[in-house]
Image (cartoon, rainbow, N blue to C red):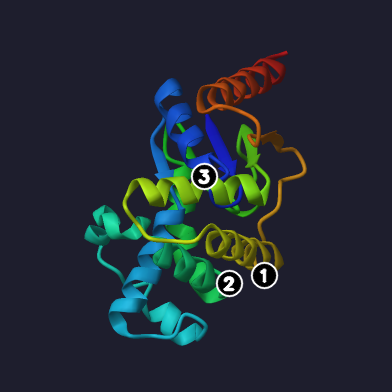
C-alpha cells in the first residue's frame, strides 16, 4: 500500500504522516527533509538559493545531513522552499522518492507533490491543510517552546510567502491531487486529526476492495 500525504507547512501533515506510518506499519519518508538538506548544504556552500546552479550543486549532500536537527530550523525551511522552485533540484531528488514509494510492501511519504508527481498511483492520497493564521500560531508556539525569539507577524509572513512559492512554482506546484481526500485541521486536536486521517485511509481501502 502506498499512502501519499501532502499539504502546506505547519498543517500537521508531518505528525499525521508519522502516526499513519506507525499505525499501518509502513516505511516512512519525510520528503521535505531532502529539500531542507539541500537548503542546509547550500548555506554551507555559501550559495544563492535563487540560483539554479548553486541549488543543484547543493543536491550532492551527505546522507548524514538528514539526521542533523538543524534541518528543522525555520531559516532552513525557508531555504528549502526557495530551492524547491528549481526544476533541476526537483528532478535530482525525484528518483530517490519514487524508488522509496515503490519499494516492495509499499510506503508512506509526506511532502508537497507526492500524490501529484512522485506517486500519482498511490492507493490513498491525503491533503492536509489549515488556515495560514492557525499554522502560524502553531509554528510560533513551537518556536517559543524552544526558546527562539520570534514575532508572530514574521512567522505568518514567512508562511504566506512559502505558500505563494510552493503553490505558484511552474514545476510540481503544491495542490491537492484530483482524487485526494482533504482534511482541514484548523479546528482539530492532534488526536482528532490523526483519527480522521486513519478513518479516511480505512474508508478508501475498503472502497477499493468492493
User: Is residue 119 something one can see in this rendering?
Assistant: no
Q: First in sequence: mark 2 or mark 3?
A: 2
For residue 50, side relative to residue 166 (left or right) = left
Q: Are marks 2 and 3 in contact (CB under 8 Å)?
A: no
The residue carrying pointer 1 sits among few (fewer than 14), some (14 to 19) or many (20 or more) residues within 10 Å by Cα, namely some
Dividing the picture into quadrants, the one containing residue 125 is: top right
| Helix, strand or loop at mark 1 | loop
Q: First in sequence: mark 3 or mark 1?
A: 3
Q: Which residue is mark 1?
A: 169
Q: Which residue is mark 3?
A: 138
Residue 19 appears at what percent x and percent y? 44, 28
Tell me which residue sits at (53%, 57%) in the image.
152
Distance of label 2 from label 3 (alpha carbons): 25 Å
- Please identify, in this view, whether the residue under mark 2 or under mark 3 is nearer the observer: 3
Q: Are marks 3 and 1 in contact (CB under 8 Å)?
A: no
Q: Which residue is mark 2?
A: 85
User: Is residue 40 something one can see in this rendering?
Assistant: yes
Position of the C terminus, as image quadrant, is top right
- What's the mark number on residue 142? none
Which is nearer the eye, 190 or 141? 141
Residue 20 appears at what percent x and percent y? 48, 28
On screen, 58 above or below 134?
below
For residue 180, side relative to residue 17 (left or right) = right
Q: Are marks 1 and 2 in contact (CB under 8 Å)?
A: yes
Which is nearer the eye, 13 or 203? 13
Distance of label 1 from label 2 (alpha carbons): 6 Å
Residue sitting at the far right: 178
| Helix, strand or loop at mark 2 | loop
| Helix, strand or loop at mark 3 | helix
* Tally of numbered tags: 3
On screen, 92 above or below 3?
below
Amino acid at each position: 500500500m502506498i499512502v501519499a500525504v501532502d499539504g502546506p507547512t505547519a498543517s500537521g501533515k508531518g505528525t499525521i504522516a508519522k502516526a499513519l506510518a506507525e499505525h499501518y506499519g509502513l516505511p516512512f519518508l519525510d520528503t521535505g527533509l531532502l529539500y531542507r538538506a539541500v537548503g542546509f548544504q547550500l548555506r554551507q556552500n555559501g550559495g544563492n538559493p535563487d540560483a539554479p546552479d548553486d541549488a543543484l550543486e547543493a543536491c550532492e549532500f551527505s546522507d548524514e545531513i538528514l539526521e542533523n536537527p538543524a534541518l528543522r530550523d525555520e531559516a532552513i525551511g525557508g531555504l528549502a522552499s526557495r530551492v524547491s522552485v528549481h526544476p533541476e533540484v526537483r528532478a535530482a531528488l525525484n528518483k530517490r522518492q519514487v524508488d522509496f514509494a515503490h519499494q516492495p510492501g509499499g510506503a508512506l511519504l509526506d511532502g508537497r507533490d507526492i500524490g501529484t508527481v512522485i506517486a500519482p498511483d498511490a492507493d490513498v492520497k491525503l491533503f492536509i491543510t489549515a488556515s495560514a493564521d492557525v499554522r502560524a500560531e502553531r509554528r510560533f508556539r513551537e518556536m517559543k517552546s524552544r526558546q527562539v525569539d520570534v514575532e508572530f507577524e514574521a512567522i505568518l509572513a514567512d508562511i504566506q510567502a512559502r505558500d505563494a512559492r510552493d503553490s505558484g512554482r511552474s514545476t510540481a506546484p503544491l495542490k491537492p491531487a484530483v482524487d485526494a481526500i482533504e482534511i482541514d485541521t484548523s479546528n482539530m486536536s492532534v488526536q482528532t486529526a490523526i483519527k480522521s486521517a486513519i478513518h479516511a485511509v480505512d474508508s478508501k481501502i475498503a472502497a477499493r476492495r468492493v
